[in-house]
Image (cartoon, rainbow, N blue to C red):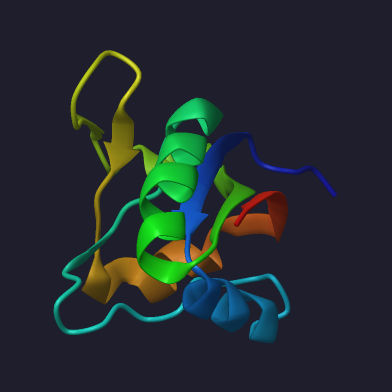
Amino acid sequence: MNRPPTTTLWRPTGPVELDLVRRSGWRAWPPRLPEQPIFYPVLNEDYAIRIARDWNVKHDGSGYVTRFEVDSVFLSRYPVQRAGGETILELWVPAEELDLFNAHIVGEIQLVHTFR
């Protein structure tokens, strides 16, 4: 079986969201809350680390960085968003498309960093 070309994405997250990912068998991101109209994975590990360490720890007591692969052809529907400097890059996935996005994750979501 040929694996489609994939793109590596990272997601900084707090303990509640990480627990929901764990409950999914490390296969899917949970639905957004009403005040969260977009799901934003990021395109580089350093940016994800900064958010998890500097924001999630302050607000949630701990922060985590996950890494996962998504079908590259599917991802082409989401333009890269520059949220600051040259390396502060995100994808903005509308909340109503998250199930479709999850269906294009290849393999499992991996926990790669923990901050407390």
Q: Residue furthest right?
A: 1
Q: What percent of the width, then of the height, locates residue 14?
A: 48, 66
Occupied quadrant, residue 95? bottom left
Q: Nearer the viewer, residue 43 or 50?
A: 50
Give the residue displayed 19% in from the left and 32% down from the top.
83
**In the image, is residue 70 above or below residue 24?**
above
- 53 and 44: which one is in front? 53
Query: In x, y percent, where is residue 111?
Result: 70, 55
| Relative to 102, 98 lies left or right | left
The structure residue drawn at horizontal position 50% and vertical position 80%, both measured from the top left corner, is 16
Establish if 43 lies above or below 26.
above
Which residue is drawn at the image coordinates 18% and 25% (left, top)?
Answer: 84
At 46% from the left and 57% from the top, the residue drawn is: 57
Vertical arrangement, residue 29 with respect to residue 39, above or below: below
Residue at the limit of the structure toward the top, as seen here: 86
Pick the front one: 4 or 106: 106
Direction from residue 52 to residue 32 in the image, left or right: left
Q: Quadrant location of the C terminus? A: bottom right
Residue 20 x, y percent position in the rendering: 56, 82
- Number of marks: 0
Q: Nearer the viewer, residue 33 or 75?
A: 33
Give residue 69's position: percent from left, percent from top.
62, 46
